[in-house]
Amino acid sequence: MREKRFCATAAALLLGLALLPLLQPAIGQKACPEGCSKFGTCNLELGRCDCPWNYTGDACQTHNPAGFCVKRLGVDNPINTCKDGDPTLCVNACNGRGDCKGGFCHCKEGRDIHKVDRPPLQLAFMERILSGGHRTHNPEEADFFYIPGSSRDLKKAFLLQPLLAYISTTWPFWNATGGARHIMPAEGDVGTCELPLKVRLFTANVTWLQFWGMYDFHPHWTQIFHNRIPCMVPGRDIVVPFMAMSSHDRFVIETPLHPRNQKRNRTNTFFFAGGVCGSGNKRALPPHCTYYKQVRYSGGVRQAVYLHFHNRTGWRVVPGTDDYARDYASSRFCLAAAGGGWGKRGIVAAMYGCIPVAATDMLYEAFEPEMDWGRFGVRITQAEIPQLADKLEAYSEAEVARMQERTACAAQHLHWSTNLGGIMGET
């Protein structure tokens, strides 16, 4: 497989990628410019300092605060105050070969073009592999084979059938392992549960990368299960964190976990803002969520939390906010809730130093079960939601401080620093 430039499409690399044993050191490590780790992330393979949004220069030393926005305008008019197109909103300013849109590079005319509003998982992972030093041209040396096919919607999911048929009939490695040691992304709201049953059965041994971690049958999501086949198989699949980089989430760069960023007093015990009843009448609130899609939305978690705690003193539980950054930074605990499918609030909460509270039955969060969210956050069952206030308010100041310290550590593993650059002082 010959090397491709940064702006090559994933399709051009399909089937040709294998990964070196992950425990081996990266090949040909090179030093980065002095001072890189202050704001950037050192790419040891290329000796390049990868800059986060709003920073440029060989060592990411040049700051451009005018290219960034922190909040949106109003709950009912969610217009972003920042403007797409500023190259510093993308990592490495697109290397001068593309335009920045939605935080992801769109290649200039004459180069391969892939237009997206936020990076598809298969491209984000591909970008990391291309610069990570773990590839090999010899498939016999590989531990894993990566297939960057998209399955984000039903049409693309069905296109996986001819793709997998081609792989299994053309290359010997699939049949030799029964599909094991092959890695594929499942970007849908409910992960592999969006795939046709035929594809799911054919890929029973594949390791799926997905945002959705439902590992057992949940009565509120009966519509997504094929014969009760779990969406995520622990030990085989990996629940990956979503990439906090869309226009809605750009405020994460202002995280108080970075030593140079502003800190707020965490005066709220608990925070959640967002749709409560989901589909149907979005203005409906418990106990008036009676439409069947409203009943099953978020597995019933958002509805139960709102019903029990929206009037509680010190608890900010609202159907919307005009400043997520302020509320995350001002709260001790934040709800990690699903929506119609996977949810991002637990990731964003951790990246803002707010201790995440996971309360959805049979649902793993990012990197679980290998990274136990109960070690740094709070995990309860849905039946325990009515007693949530008693549990959270019983923690001592010392216990909260220890959880906050662990959350700050975990947050560094939930951010795609090697793609987007460090935002918490991580190296």
Image (spheres, helix red, strand yellow):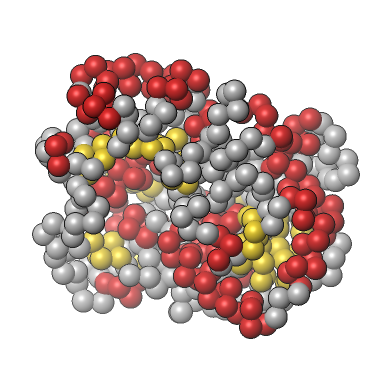
Q: Is residue 423 left or right of residue 167?
A: right
Q: Residue at x 83, y 45 (%)?
A: 285
Farthest right residue in view: 287
Question: In the rendered view, would you say 272 is above or below 2?
Answer: below
Q: How many marks?
A: 0
State whether residue 254 appears in this view.
no
In percent of width and height, residue 363 lies at 60, 45
Name which quarter of the figure residue 347 lies in: bottom right
Front-most of residues 207 and 157: 207
Front-most of residues 142 and 412: 142
Name which quarter of the figure residue 267 lies in: bottom right
In percent of width and height, residue 307 lies at 84, 52
Question: In the rendered view, would you say 263 is above or below 160?
Answer: below
In percent of width and height, residue 238 lies at 43, 45
Farthest bottom residue in view: 398
In percent of width and height, residue 71 lies at 59, 60
Front-most of residues 351 and 240: 240
Q: Is residue 383 left or right of residue 255?
A: right
Q: Is residue 12 left or right of residue 366?
A: left
Name the image quarter holding the N terminus.
top left
Front-most of residues 258 and 205: 205
State whether residue 413 appears in this view.
yes
Name the image quarter holding the C terminus.
bottom left
Q: Residue at x 42, y 28 (%)?
A: 204
Name which quarter of the figure residue 30 lies in: bottom left
Question: In the rendered view, would you say 169 is above or below 114?
Answer: above
Q: Residue at x 53, y 76 (%)?
A: 405
Q: Residue at x 50, y 52 (%)?
A: 369
